[in-house]
Image (cartoon, rainbow, N blue to C red):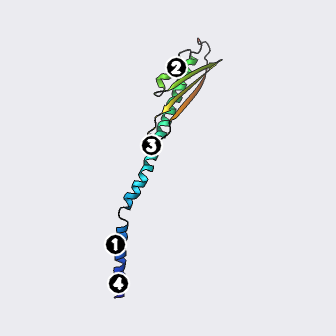
Amino acid sequence: MSADRGTSGRAGGAGSWGARERGSFTAELAAGLPALMLLLFAGLTAVDAVTTKAGCVDAAREAALAAARGEPGSTAGSRYAPAGADITVTVAGDRVTVTVRAPVRSFGARLPRLSVSGTAVAAVEPGSPGPLP
């Protein structure tokens, strides 16, 4: 008889434990969801920043090579630059330096605004008419 009481007491305890935990997953999800969304937005912004950085480096390289050959560097760079990019071509002696700076689109209103840049340097080619910005 005492064995039956112990078994029924254990079953009653397990039933009451399950009733106390009802809804805890929903509460934990509601508390953790904003943090999960912030991490998702930050991750997407980071991926976009890396893509924009690669575009800036490509645009700077093309603009520097074009300017070193005597072609307009800004025009060549704008074909490869990300949207909203600012292209700066500087000629100093026999070197052409191009810097491309572009804003990164952030996927959250609360995330800070970012901008990335890419720089390339090219030597002026001999016999060219001269570097053009």
C-alpha separation, residue under disc 2 versus residue under disc 4 = 88 Å
Q: What residue type is labelled 2?
A: Ser
Give the foreground label among 2 and 4. Answer: 4
Q: Is mark 1 on a helix, strand or loop?
A: helix
C-alpha separation, residue under disc 3 versus residue under disc 2 = 33 Å
C-alpha separation, residue under disc 2 versus residue under disc 1 = 74 Å
Residue at label 2?
74
From this view, report whether residue 127 is shown above or below residue 24.
above
Give the foreground label among 3 and 2. Answer: 3
First in residue order: circle 3 vs circle 2: 3
Q: Do the residues labelled 3 and 2 touch (CB within 8 Å)?
A: no
Residue at label 3?
41
Residue at label 1?
15
Q: Which amino acid does label 1 sit on?
A: Gly
Q: Position of residue 39 (x, y in %)?
A: 46, 47
Neighbour tally class for label 3: few under 14, some 14-19, many 20 plus, Cα within 10 Å: some
